[in-house]
Image (cartoon, grey):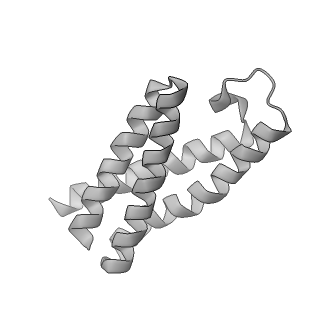
């Protein structure tokens, strides 16, 4: 049971890293703005600055170093994904809502399993 959960957790974390990277490189792809302004680009980079390292940690730590510290890292990643889901909900972006919520649940379940 733990191996498939660790794999699913890693996949959801990598998906978050990919989306954050895409948003940083091409902000219009996720902001739905035809021509993102400086503020949108700045927020895309700020999001990537948070999401990429956290996603890398959430994907790799449960495999390399299970324990309490990893549990807290995963809970932080879950909170971040839950906030992303809430933002998606507020914007009517059901894909962002569903992926963020599902990722948050996977991170919490993995945190409990490895903590």
Residue at 70 percent of width and 44 percent of height: 44
Residue at 66 percent of width and 40 percent of height: 23
In-front residue for pair 13/47: 47
Please indicate, yes or no, whether residue 87 appears anywhere in the rendered image: yes
The picture places residue 106, in percent across and down from the top left corner, at 30, 51
The picture places residue 1, in percent across and down from the top left corner, at 14, 59
**Relative to 7, is 33 on the left or the right?**
right
In-front residue for pair 107/80: 80
**Relative to 100, is 107 on the left or the right?**
left
In-front residue for pair 55/100: 100
Q: Is residue 81 above or below residue 53?
A: above
In-front residue for pair 20/94: 94
**Relative to 58, is 8 on the left or the right?**
left
Please indicate, yes or no, whether residue 65 appears anywhere in the rendered image: no
Furthest-front residue in this view: 90
Q: Quadrant of the C terminus?
A: bottom left
So how many labels did they put on this image?
0
Q: Quadrant of residue 74?
A: bottom left
Q: Quadrant of residue 108?
A: bottom left
The picture places residue 39, in percent across and down from the top left corner, at 80, 40
């Amino acid at each position: 049971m733990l191996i498939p959960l660790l794999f699913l957790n890693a996949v959801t974390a990598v998906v978050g890293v990919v989306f954050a990277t895409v948003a940083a490189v091409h902000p219009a792809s996720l902001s739905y703005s035809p021509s993102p302004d400086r503020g949108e680009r700045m927020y895309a980079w700020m999001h990537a600055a948070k999401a990429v390292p956290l996603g890398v940690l959430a994907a790799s730590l449960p495999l390399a170093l299970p324990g309490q510290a990893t549990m807290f890292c995963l809970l932080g990643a879950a909170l971040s994904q839950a906030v992303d889901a809430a933002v998606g909900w507020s914007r009517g972006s059901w894909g962002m809502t569903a992926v963020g919520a599902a990722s948050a649940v996977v991170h919490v379940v993995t945190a409990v399993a490895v903590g």
